[in-house]
Amino acid sequence: MPATRHLSLLALAMGLAYPATAQDAPQTAAVEEAASGDIIVSARRRDESLLEVPIAVTTFSGDALIAQGAQDITALQRQTPNLTLQVARGSNSTLIAFIRGVGQQDPLWGFEPGVGLYVDDVYIARPQGAVLDVFDVERIEILRGPQGTLYGRNTIGGAIKYVTKRLGNEFRGNARATYGSYNQIDLVGNIAIPLGENFAIGGAVAWLQRDGFGTNLTTGAEAYNKDVLAGRLSAEFDNGSVFVRLAADRTEDNSNARHGTRLTGNLGLPAFQPTESVFDTRAGIGDDNKVMTQGVSLTAEIPINQTLTFKSITAYRDGRTDTLIDFDNTPGPVLDIPAYYEDDQWTQEVQLLIEGDRLQGVIGGFYLDGRAEGAFDTVIGNAGLTTFTAGRVDTKSIAFFGDFSYDLTEQFKISAGLRWTKDDKTATVLRQDWLGIRSPFFGNPNARFFRTRTDYTNDRSFEAFTPRISLSYQPTEDLNVYASWGRGFKSGGFDMRGDAIFIPSTVNGYEPEFIDSWELGFKGAFLDRRLFINAAAFYSDYKDQQVTVQAVQPPPNVGVASVVDNAGQATIYGFELEMRAIPTDNLQFNLAFGYTFAEYNEFLTFIAGGTTPIDVADQRVFQNTPRYVVNANLTWSNPLFGGRLDIIPAVALRSQQSMFEIPNALLDQPATVIADVAVNWTSEDNRFTLGVQGRNLTNELYRVGGYNFPGALLGNSIIGYYGPPRTISVMAGFNF
């Protein structure tokens, strides 16, 4: 038994849990808290009231998410305008993230994410293991629009900040257990132990188990199951001015591979039969899948004087994924992918925080030294051919940034920022054809080498200045109107699947992408702070967008090749509205509305191995970007049995969306309506919590991903992946 599992079981036996007090215990209603309106965020690297921040940002407390039955950060999609967070194809813990039409669906090593993910200010470079479970979290902030003048790594679409709880200087803890549909068993714990007046140690652990929503009808294994063990340990020194935290975390996801289900007929595959459930599969490649991520970080905040604070964030992370992908979903090796990904990163960030009477801001520097590598076979069983692909990308990034806000008057404030980034990338790509089912690298020593398709090592540097400026007017304490402009940048790179026979120019890599984003918004509190409204209109000019297309090669170069296009120019504009109303002391209503119009003005691509790019903008759409999003929930609280009863119904509506840039009637997801409800009781002293949570009550079937490889040779392999069905769970928590 691994040491981490010994540690976690010991922790569970001791009843470790969330460090909770009357202030931070699960606030299942949070009506009284919401009435103050003083929601504090650190979106601009300093604690501020949400009302004063001239950025489109949405924040959620970890306690509120737990009360609603949210298991991981993908639940935020149901409450945030113009946000897509989904579990990627084939794995339980690989993240797909889009904000306002900007993101990254391809989780292959070497690609930069369009939406940045931070855990306690540590940048998470890879999407593997990024579907973070909700435990030991104080709050999650979602920043929409390009970020770079405030954060370690430039992100072109936005950022998600996962902020864990500080230990404090009092002994405290909490235990939480959940049992639900499909034999769901979640055991979560956290403890904080003070060792002296200013020093504390603590830990958190989560053991998350669930049977599958379906079955692999070929192997008998569970499909869409969950088997996750995660833990964090930390030691903190905090004397009220100096704060130092040493933290370590590790997550192991041993859930079975997710194979999806076929959406097409057999095209000459006699073994194919449709499945009765969309969660069933007939994949024959196997079910082994393992994702491991871990890291350690050291954060220090040291005041220099009343105005200046020095902050340092040092971190190391690594991870590995071993997975099996069955593109054809049949017992045979028609189109199978055994694969592994591996990465590590070392980051160092330093900041000088400025907090004066009229001037506030941050000056910082960021350095990243990262490695990402992997290998996979593309097995085309009908041709008796396997294409072996392996590669590695080494990235060294250095950046300097600054962002300052100055109070021109008590009402007018101006904020400006600038970032300089330089990325140096070195890539090695090897792509070979082998005769046989699998290559020697993935277990077939009898395969015969046929030819090399790609074999190169190349390096490139990418450099950019990205500015930002905003002007805000606050006529009263409860109203803030702002206008902003910012530029986002995502560096170029090399296609790890690049096929030099199909596209010879792949050895040169692809170019960076840029976005210019304008935003006009206001934030206000009305009716004696019984009504809060945040609204923003945005317009973005998107240039050289990086799009990955899986192209089927025509004879004689039979196979599947990847093409990364710098698609050209696109226009994105839209509107967001977030409203929080508190009509009575026992009732709260939340509404989030998002509208995004995204259209390609130019989309240049190589068609069928041609050498001249063709503009197909009229045939392409934005993926993972529904036109309309409406999220609403109601919280009703009332005294009951010496405690408080909270009832939280919620509904989330998303209009039709495309899975890829090329529309496909079989894959594209029609409009969906997801209904949830939670009923929670909390004792008067906040020591005991009991709850029942229902998710997707109407059992809506909705696709969250897919693959598209049509044609007889590839088994007409069009498959879909689906979001969770209806689930009911019962939760009990105890604070001590």
Image (cartoon, rainbow, N blue to C red):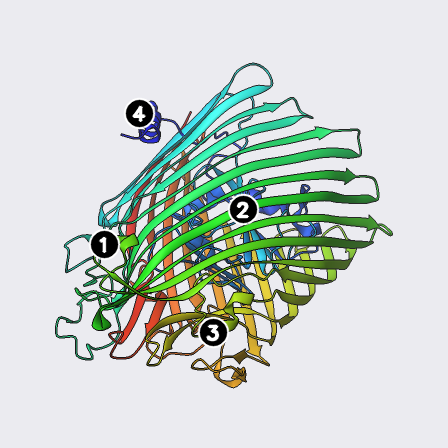
**Earlier along the polypeptide chain: callout 3 or callout 1?**
1
Quadrant the N terminus occupies:
top left
Cβ atoms under marks 1 and 4 closer than 8 Å:
no
Side of 448 where 655 appears, left or right = right
Q: Which residue is mark 1?
A: 445
Tell which circle, 1 or 4, labels the residue nearer the N-terminal end. Answer: 4
Relative side of 581 to 150, left or right: left
Q: Is residue 395 visible?
A: yes
Q: Nearer the viewer, residue 585 or 181?
A: 181
User: Which mark lies nearer to you, 4 or 3?
Assistant: 3
Q: Which residue is mark 2?
A: 370
- Residue receiving disc 4: 13
Q: Position of residue 87 (x, y in %)?
A: 39, 56
Image x and y of residue 647, in percent: 40, 49
Q: Depth check: 720 or 211 in front? A: 720
Between the residue at mark 3 and the residue at mark 2, the CA separation in whole angstroms equals: 27 Å
- Judging from the image, what secondary structure is the residue with disc 1 in? loop
Amino acid carrying label 4: it is Ala
**Callout 1: 10 Å neighbours few (<14), some, many (20+)?**
few
Comes first in the chain, label 2 or label 1: 2
Residue 696 percent location from the top left of the image: 33, 59
Give the quadrant of residue 735.
top left
